[in-house]
Image (cartoon, rainbow, N blue to C red):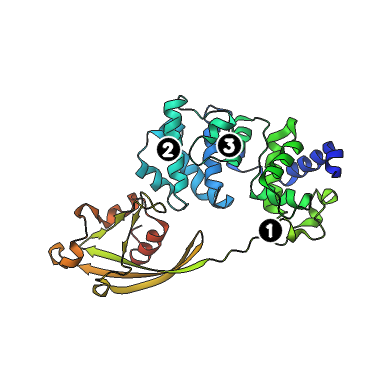
Amino acid sequence: MSKIFEQLSAFHEAILGWYALYGRRELIWRNLSDDVERGYKVYVSEVMLQQTQVNVVQQRFYAPFLEKFPTLESLAKADEEKVLKAWQGLGYYTRARNLHRSAKICLKQYNAKLPQTFEELKSLPGIGDYTAGAILCFGFLKPVSFVDGNIRRLFSRLFALEQPSLRNLNDIAKNLLCLHSSFDYNQALLDLGATLCISKNPQCLICPLLCYCEGKNNPLIYPTPKKTALEPKALFLGVLIVEDFIYLQKSNTKLYYGLYNLLNLEESPYLNLFQHHHSFKHSYTKYILQVHIYILEISDKNQIPQEIMQGLNNENFFNRTCLKELPLSALTFKALAKIFPNTI
């Protein structure tokens, strides 16, 4: 048995003492007032933080999103397009759609409030074990344990576990939980994993848990690292400009659902009608994209070549001045920002 369980009070004191001195206590979502929307505000922060860096969320997205949708009810009643627009720049738009869907469910089933049980939270779209636990602990101040990627790495090194199962880690988290200060304790675990017990170059010598750590002599093997390589892929996208109007397609595919995108010219018979404008690299999930942007400017709509016009919808032409109002995919935004730097 690890000596942590034999010295649990001292273990808790070491973590809480470190957090009091070095924790990221200034984060907005760690200083919320105890109002009826606290759980909702924590929920928003947790969803944003799932695949976005803390400083990016705090500095650019969290406060503006809550200004637009200050309550769960206001989010539930908003148009999806406005929600996606407010999310623009965060990427992984499934998060925003699930957030919106969950708000609608809560409006109907829970009187526009988040439920306060683990199973009910997990029944909402996009909420898993970690997010449900974080909402209960940070939003409703309940003594609940959970495991995210940072805590997984921290516990794997503490107990020298090469390939721990999630069940094993959840059991450890539950047994180590500091019941009387669960908010600060859980925040401290997250911070230790994010700032000291990092994937590469862990700061073992200044870690408050060094004396308890069974993996300190070879931390990089705990847990066993997964090697993943991004798959290269080429994209050929078209910017069709007619007078002051740009043609954009609203996507119905899973990745960009509800977002506006450029014409896909891959294997298109009319690629030769467009002129190459610029190329850039763009990455997401498991792909590294080499994106080639082609442009076709026409002064009169009636001059659009028939072979192109056959596949177009007249409702998808947008004035350049409206681009700021549309939810654009990050890929489309990056492409158009190069062509119209003062427009979007």
Marks 1 and 3 close (CB-CB < 8 Å): no
Q: Is residue 134 left or right of residue 89?
A: right
Cα distance between the residues tagged 3 and 2: 16 Å
Q: Is residue 307 left or right of residue 52?
A: left
Quadrant into which the N terminus falls: top right
Q: Earlier in the sequence, mark 3 or mark 2?
A: 2
- Image coords of residue 136 (percent x, y): 61, 33
Instruction: Identify which residue, 123 or 70, lies in the foreground.
Output: 123
Instruction: Identify which residue, 85 or 289, lies in the foreground.
Output: 289
Q: Earlier in the sequence, mark 2 or mark 1?
A: 2
Which residue is the extreme one toward the left?
Answer: 302
- Image coords of residue 201 (percent x, y): 72, 62
Cα distance between the residues tagged 2 and 1: 34 Å
Q: Which mark, residue 101? A: 2
Q: Secondary structure at mark 1?
A: loop
Can you identify the residue that label 1 sits on?
199
Can you identify the residue that label 3 sits on?
132
- Image coords of residue 240 (percent x, y): 25, 64
- Image coords of residue 32 (percent x, y): 58, 34
The reply to whether residue 69 is in sight is no
Say which amino acid is labelled 3: Ala
Q: Could you tell me which residue is drawn at 40 percent across and 43 percent down?
A: 83
